[in-house]
Image (tube, grey):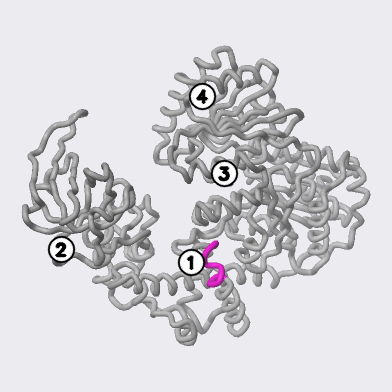
Amino acid sequence: MELSTPIQFVKGIGPKTAERFAKLEVFTAGDLLQLYPRNYVDYSNPCGISDAPFDIACVVRGEVYSKSGETRVKGGKRMAKVLAGDENCMLELVWFNNPYTAEKLEVGQEYLFFGKVGGTFTKRQMIAPVVHPVTGAPPITPIYPQTEGLNSAFIGRCVSNVLEQLSEKLPEPLPEEMLVRYRLPHKDAAVRAIHFPASLDHVLAARRRLIYEELLVLQLGLLLLKTRDKQTSAPILEQVDLHPFFDSLPFRPTGAQQRACGEILQDMQKPIPMNRLLQGDVGSGKTLVAAAAIYAAFQNGRQAVLMAPTEILARQHAATLQTMLEKFGIQTALLVGGMRAAQKRETLSAIADGKAHLVVGTHAVLSGGVQFSDLGVAITDEQHRFGVRQRQTLAQKGKTPHLLVMSATPIPRTLALLIYGELDISVLDELPPGRTPIKTFAITSKKRADMFGFLQEQIDNGRQVYLVCPLIEESEKVAELKSVKTYLEQIVQPLLPHCRIGLMHGKLKPKEKDAVMQEFKEGLLDVLVSTTVIEVGVDVPNANVMVIENAERYGLSALHQLRGRVGRGGGESWCILVSDHKGESVKQRLRFLCSTTDGFKIAQFDLENRGPGDFFGKRQHGLPGLKLADLMTDTRTLKAAQQDALQLLHTDPRLDSLPILAEQVQTLFEQNTAMN
């Protein structure tokens, strides 16, 4: 068997089971080996029943004293009970609709039971435990990420089948000198140990090795991208005085905005293409910085293009930039998919002959018919929404124009510099003066009626309201549609009976979503109910209340992004988080969000408490999802990997001497086309 073998041909897996594995992003035998355990059960050191912690999964050892027959309980379930214990304490074991496990247990025999202990101190209970005989139990058992129809034990058997059927040992991508220097096990040994370790020490050694390799490949990929950009030449722009532009504004730019503008202008005066990430909090003024770059290109006789992910956002940018720049003679052209043929021909002609100094559009600017006269700078908004191929296509529209990518998801600067390698980063860490902080509250559903009374007051005063439901996976769109309609019909309409309500959900086509959003923006709707994340960057100044149902379903950074949709006009604004979750960690996260509007503090808190997997996933930043490494706790390894990557590329720029490692980096590029 090869690593590229489709997962359905692995022993024990067929086409139907392969579809379930696809939900875990496992498509080949190699993918399965990279589905690493998320935890382990140590059967080698069970605790006494009386010492078992409450509500925490653990292994206890006990003798079976008696078995009860199966009984019917409320709801039609079948329940089987077994009484076990040790010399100090009794333990009641309960299974629902699973009599077979209880039937297999023998009275008088000792077993190991894994599960969460509940009940009371005098009557301890474990529901649906995993059972192993005392003799022959595996010392360490892996626990895998699961999905419907795939339990951990089955996944473990499939992994074992792959390892048994491999035609040869896993190839070693790292140089031998590196293995010796860091005392790392070889790749084959590490992969086998992380899936089926003999002890927890073996797990730690395997994880250390695989985390290092993962971070080294990441750093090599980022550095190679940077090197590739430096091998091309870009139009050198002359130094531009930005004072006329700044003086034309009705407000003074923040220090952060002026600093970012200076960094961008310095880049544009170099013969290599600028490749700069501009990241800033919601409302930090990224559009102004983009306008300064466009102004500088115009003063050098060159064109600029700004690409936005949706038509409504492109129209908004075009209107905003035209207001800021037309006084300097800069002509703005809008290019979107829904234009009439004659209008589109006229716009394309203006772009080709240079009469359009700034082009703002959607993916339409990438089409073959778009030819620029002299493109100097290309800007993409919400950079994670565009793949590297799309940005390459955009760059090919000119003679390698300077590139500025903007992101509204802030991350701590020190971590950003480490993660993005040598990518140039500008950070907007100040908010423009005059923005009223959004008041944020967390409530339970018991106060929903009172909340809707408050919403009605705001609507009666001429304001508008967002109501956001949890985002549901693509595969659940039918359930999503049903759930949002139920929410609308059973909760929103009865509590806001005389309001104009719009609905946004996953079944709508992009144009239909844009139409609903446009109605809301124009004030034709009082309330927008949405199951999808409301488009980042769309301004509806009259909307001053954001309600987020089941707020525990989102990370803090996502909640902060949603909150930023209000507070863009005058007067007070509110964000109301609705959650009935009892977990203390959830309550702590929501309390923290209520206490601050600083996106960088929120990002730091989210990273430390929720982990980087979601925060740095493909959906937010275009970085490849990390399978093992933790960007908060593995910073020492990350720094070492960054230094080693620099050294490797210095001595071997194309990694010719390390073909397996080079192939891994290439695969990273192919699978993560949203990388910069």
Q: Which residue is mark 4?
A: 447
Counting from the top left corner in percent of width and height, residue 400 is at 72, 62
SS under mark 3: helix
Q: Amino acid at mark 1?
A: Thr
Q: Which residue is mark 1?
A: 667
Q: The magenta stretch spans which residues? A: 632-638
Which of the two discs, 3 and 4, sits closer to the camera? 4
Judge left or right: residue 165 versus residue 393. left
Asked if labels 4 and 2 touch by Cβ distance under 8 angstroms, the answer is: no
Real-space Cα distance between discs 4 and 1?
51 Å
Category of crowding for the residue at label 1, using alpha-carbon neighbours closer than 10 angstroms: few (below 14), some (14–19), many (at least 20): few
Real-space Cα distance between discs 1 and 2?
45 Å
Asked if labels 1 and 4 touch by Cβ distance under 8 angstroms, the answer is: no
Q: Amino acid at mark 3?
A: Ala
| Residue drawn at 79 percent across, 41 percent down | 321
- Which disc number belongs to residue 541? none
Q: Which badge, 3 or 4, is on the more N-terminal residue?
A: 4
Category of crowding for the residue at label 2, using alpha-carbon neighbours closer than 10 angstroms: few (below 14), some (14–19), many (at least 20): some
SS under mark 4: helix
SS under mark 1: helix
Q: Which badge, 4 or 1, is on the more N-terminal residue?
A: 4
Q: Which residue is mark 2?
A: 134
Q: Which badge, 1 or 2, is on the more N-terminal residue?
A: 2
Real-space Cα distance between discs 2 and 3?
47 Å
Asked if labels 3 and 2 touch by Cβ distance under 8 angstroms, the answer is: no
Real-space Cα distance between discs 2 and 4?
52 Å
Q: Which badge, 2 or 4, is on the more N-terminal residue?
A: 2
Judge left or right: residue 29 versus residue 371. left
Front residue of 529 and 345: 529
Q: Which badge, 1 or 3, is on the more N-terminal residue?
A: 3
| Residue drawn at 8 percent across, 45 percent down | 67
Q: Which residue is mark 3?
A: 558
